[in-house]
């Protein structure tokens, strides 16, 4: 039995520039942080039969990998040449469709578990890149490289993506005191709105490929803001980071009417009226988690105002381990 966990993440800067439709023309930059909320994946060899069993939001029991409906599991098993006698069960700390990158984490965890099963563990960057290839090319999901790399590496991580898709991975040079300030000043609230990111991302992909000036200019500015956020955090200026988050959110909404909605706009404005400097919806937009940055004197006021709106706070810490095998016996 093998148990693997992969961390979810909160993007801090550059989101959206990791899609091929953008980085193949301009290069991309992502700054993100893994958090201590996880996707867990359990893999076992059943003793009594040779069937394949999958337990996720659905249940599948089939005779061969080709029969599997899950469009990430099927190509992954075929990649490893695994066609029978396998049980795969997944669990997560947050619901699917909440912008935390759960599909990318699921795939990275699955790849690590199966490579452990085959006794041929992949190096971290190979693990991330293989997960990207499966989801982007074999499954055809309109996603970028962000989720897979942050899941694999964990920590506060910068991704420089060149026009060929090559990724240079580096840890953000950030002080312990800055990390503590971020841990204290960032609040996450579950909006109760679940949605698929694929519609928003597919629209961005098409607009970018078509050269839509509003979308391309927004992504160019997003990348610039990502570098400015990186320097603010390296310098320990967390309040500047909060103000840049506000610029990022206002800019991101220019790309599509699907990124926000009247409820999200109201909650965001309530947080700002009570002292939050900035924030964003985690992921592609439209629902999931709302993250806000609050200087310490106003944190409780902001928290109370959003809880009064019916939002549920999710406490979190940062993860610096990335995807890891928890049990193997």
Image (spheres, rainbow, N blue to C red):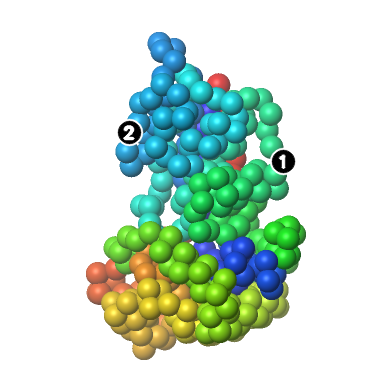
Which circle marks residue 213 in the picture? none
In this view of the protein, can residue 240 be seen by the observer? yes
Could you say where residue 101 lies in the image, as x and y percent from the top left?
48, 56
Q: Residue drawn 38% across and 78% down? A: 257
Give the Cα separation between the discs numbered 2 and 1: 31 Å
Q: Residue drawn 35% across and 26% down? A: 61
Could you say where residue 270 lies in the image, as x and y percent from the top left?
33, 83
Could you say where residue 104 lies in the image, as x and y percent from the top left?
52, 50
Which circle marks residue 59 in the picture? 2
Which circle marks residue 123 in the picture? 1
> Where is residue 260, by image quadrant?
bottom left
Q: Secondary structure at mark 1?
A: loop
Q: Is residue 233 above or below residue 125?
A: below
In front of the other: 316 or 25: 25
In front of the other: 297 or 280: 280
Residue farthest top in this picture: 48
In front of the other: 238 or 211: 211
Q: Quadrant of the C terminus?
A: top right
Q: Earlier in the sequence, mark 2 or mark 1?
A: 2
Q: Is residue 64 above or below residue 249?
A: above
Could you say where residue 201 lies in the image, as x and y percent from the top left?
47, 65
């Amino acid at each position: 039995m093998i148990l693997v966990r992969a961390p979810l993440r909160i993007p801090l800067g550059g989101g959206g520039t990791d899609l091929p439709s953008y980085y193949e023309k301009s290069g991309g930059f992502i700054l993100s942080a893994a958090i201590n909320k996880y996707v867990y994946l359990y893999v076992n060899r059943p003793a009594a039969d040779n069937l394949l069993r999958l337990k996720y939001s659905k249940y599948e029991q089939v005779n061969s990998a080709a029969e599997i409906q899950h469009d990430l599991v099927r190509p992954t098993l075929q990649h490893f040449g695994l066609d029978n006698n396998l049980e795969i069960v997944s669990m997560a700390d947050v619901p699917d469709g909440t912008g935390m990158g759960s599909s990318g984490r699921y795939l990275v965890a699955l790849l690590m578990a199966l490579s452990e099963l085959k006794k041929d563990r992949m190096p971290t960057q190979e693990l991330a890149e293989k997960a990207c290839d499966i989801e982007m090319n074999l499954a055809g999901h309109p996603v970028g490289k962000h989720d897979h790399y942050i899941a694999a590496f964990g920590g506060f991580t910068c991704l420089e993506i060149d026009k060929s898709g090559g990724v240079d991975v580096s840890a953000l040079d950030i002080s312990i005191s800055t990390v503590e300030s971020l841990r204290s000043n960032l609040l996450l609230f579950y909006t109760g709105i679940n949605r698929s990111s694929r519609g928003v991302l597919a629209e961005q992909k098409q607009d970018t490929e078509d050269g839509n000036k509003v979308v391309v200019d927004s992504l160019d500015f997003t990348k610039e803001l990502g570098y400015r956020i990186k320097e603010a955090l390296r310098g320990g200026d967390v309040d500047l980071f909060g103000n840049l988050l506000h610029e990022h959110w206002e800019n991101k909404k220019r790309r599509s009417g699907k990124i926000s909605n009247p409820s999200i706009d109201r909650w965001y404005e309530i947080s700002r009226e009570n002292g939050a400097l900035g924030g964003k919806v985690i992921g592609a937009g439209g629902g999931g988690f709302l993250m806000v940055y609050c200087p310490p004197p106003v944190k409780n006021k902001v928290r109370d105002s959003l809880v009064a709106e019916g939002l549920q706070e999710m406490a979190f810490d940062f993860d610096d381990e990335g995807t890891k095998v928890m049990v193997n016996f």
